[in-house]
Image (cartoon, rainbow, N blue to C red):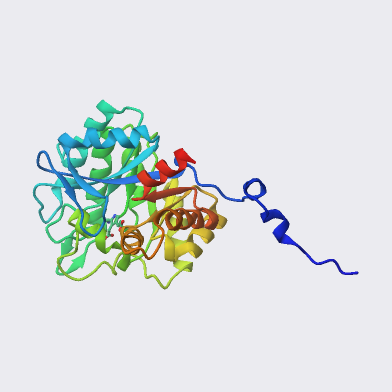
Amino acid sequence: MQLIQRPRRLRMNEAIRKMVRENQLSVTDLIYPMFVRYGENIKNPVPSMPGVYQYSLDLLPKALEEVVALKIPAILLFGLPATKDEVGSGAYADDGIIQQAVRLIKKHYPDLYVITDVCLCEYTSHGHCGLVQDGRILNDQSVELLVKTAVSQAKAGADMVAPSDMMDGRVGAIREALDVAGFCHIPIMSYAAKCSSAFYGPFRDAAGSAPQFGDRRAYQMDPANSDEAIRETALDIEEGADLIIVKPALAYGDIIYRTKQEFGLPVAAYNVSGEYAMIKAAAANGWLDEKSTVLETLLSLKRAGADLLITYHALDVARWLNLA
Ligand code: PBG
């Protein structure tokens, strides 16, 4: 007699479900993106990202108390400078907002792992990630400024740098400059496969980094491409990337999967601002249960192959996991 196959046997109760569970979320997977800004005594809510704030430097240590208490191992820092210019000088100034923030954080929380975003878009008056000439984004000249940015962040005490600009050759140039400056021990987590995405909308409010003309399609990848994601990632690894980021995350599970399979390096999935905003909006309307939706979403990224999760939900997730 042909016996019926009964996969449900391993789903009978929570004990057996836990025993055979293939993927787990852990607080150590989490990287929490944060926005630091000029000014004093400011905790500015980002309207399209409920629960996310821009903090002035004086309020930053207080905000980090919770991050540290929840045992979130790492933060990813973005900065909003007091003034912007054509060449994004605030990105690589020794007293730039990020450089100041890193020094301050390291004084209060030496063990918190601080990753700095390396890009120009928050610092340029035109909002592009590189230098602009006649409406075009220059590559090699932009790389020179990105290199200066990364080195100045390492000098300030950053534990890791994360270039998000998508200029060609920047990983190799940053690696070389870091090594020359005595920072051969500082890893590079490159936004290797970063698509030109509508899901970044809320972030550009949070970071004040919307391009003032055009869009980013001449440097960020076309969302239609996955072979190109593999080529981009291979280049970054050849140039010295230690970890790679796939961004956005939710609509890009295939790319997380392919990059992990192909290269075996640690992969971070960036669960971006628009992905956060969608769940927050649906939850606020009572249309989705926030906790289970967030946990399922992040678990799906781990299932796809992500090792690390860059997410604005990190505080909530850490709270839920610490209680579980
Ligand atoms: C800057 C940068 C962006 C994000 C991270 N770094 C925005 C962009 O490329 O316009 C997006 C993050 C998010 O949406 O959460 N280069």
Is 303 in front, or is 93? 303
Question: What residue is rendered at 46% in x and 39% in y?
Answer: 323
Residue 249 image point, x, y percent: 42, 59
Residue 137 image point, x, y percent: 22, 64
Spot the residue most to the right.
1
Q: How many marks?
A: 0
Position of residue 191 in the picture relative to residue 14 (left or right): left
Residue 208 seen = yes
Considering the image in quadrants, where does the N terminus appear? bottom right
Quadrant of res 194: bottom left
Is 102 in front, or is 229? 102
Residue 29 image point, x, y percent: 46, 44
Residue 130 vertical placement versus 226 (above, below): above
Residue 276 vertical placement versus 241 (above, below): below
Position of residue 228 in the picture relative to residue 9 (left or right): left
Position of residue 175 in the picture relative to residue 14 (left or right): left
